[in-house]
Image (tube, coloured by chain):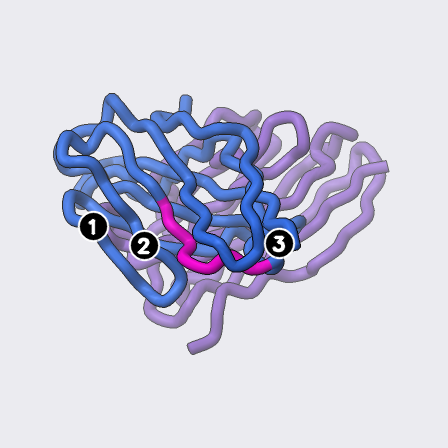
Amino acid sequence: KAGVTQTPRYLIKTRGQQVTLSCSPISGHRSVSWYQQTPGQGLQFLFEYFSETQRNKGNFPGRFSGRQFSNSRSEMNVSTLELGDSALYLCASSLGRGGDDEQFFGPGTRLTVL
Amino acid sequence: DAKTTQPPSMDCAEGRAANLPCNHSTISGNEYVYWYRQIHSQGPQYIIHGLKNNETNEMASLIITEDRKSSTLILPHATLRDTAVYYCIVRVPHGSSNTGKLIFGQGTTLQVKP
């Protein structure tokens, strides 16, 4: 069974630009969650999509958005990039039930904002 | 805020058992304890989870105290490749509105030494 894939793996952007990151979940998984990891703040939850609907949202500004397609693939978008958005962005997929339903993480996209 | 407390760092000799403690004194009766680990700049890797009973898989064992206020992850024969940050997470139960959200603390950095 293929794991969670994320594209691109590395990205360099400049301030003010926007970026779109993609995540393909494990086959059969309907939930995709996104996380941001920085040295200062650690791993922080961004949002979760389940069956094409945003089900949970973390404490991030509206510049961070996402969507999920009917095949469960998900994208996240960051507009008007700031230097502080430089981070490892991780997505995780699961069946979406909670409890004993494991989340499996992808390798991440390393975003550098110059 | 994370519902778990872990020591920031631990050392372990190669070939010996690594015992990583976690306190989760406010855990609710239907919340699961999960362990993940993250090797430098990779996505977190699922290790094991449990509710009340002790659990074992090919990677590790999870010992949960009877009152469920703490747990210990045991790597029976640590190798250099087990050097990583280990996260203990309390996961909401089935049906919760936050099923797709994992709250990561700072974790324990385990250094396995030759």
The amino acid type found where label 3 is placed reads Gln
For residue A29, side relative to residue A47 (left or right):
left
Secondary structure under badge 2? strand
Q: Pointer 2 indicates a residue of which chain?
A: B
Dot 2 or dot 1, earlier in sequence? 1
Q: In this view, does B93 lie above or below B22?
A: below
Chain letter for the purple colouring in the rendering: A
Residue drawn at x 77%, y 52% is A11
* Residue holding disc 1: B54
- Residue A20 visible to the viewer: no
Q: Residue B42 carries which label?
A: 3
Residue B32 magenta-drawn? Answer: no
Q: Is mark 3 on a helix, strand or loop?
A: loop
- Magenta residues (range): B73-79
Residue B44 shows in this picture: yes
- Circle 1 SS class: loop
Chain B, hue in figure: blue
Rounded to the nearest angstrom, the CA distance separating label 3 from label 1 is 28 Å
- Tell which subunit mark 1 falls on: B
Q: In which quarter of the image is residue B95?
A: top left
Residue A111: give x, y in percent of width and height. 73, 45
Rendering coords of residue A66 (x, y %): 51, 45
> Residue flagged by tag 1: what amino acid is it?
Asn
Q: Which residue shows up at 56% across the image and 60% down it?
A: B79
- Between circles 3 and 1, the one closer to the viewer is 1
In the rendered image, the quadrant that contains the C terminus of chain A is top right
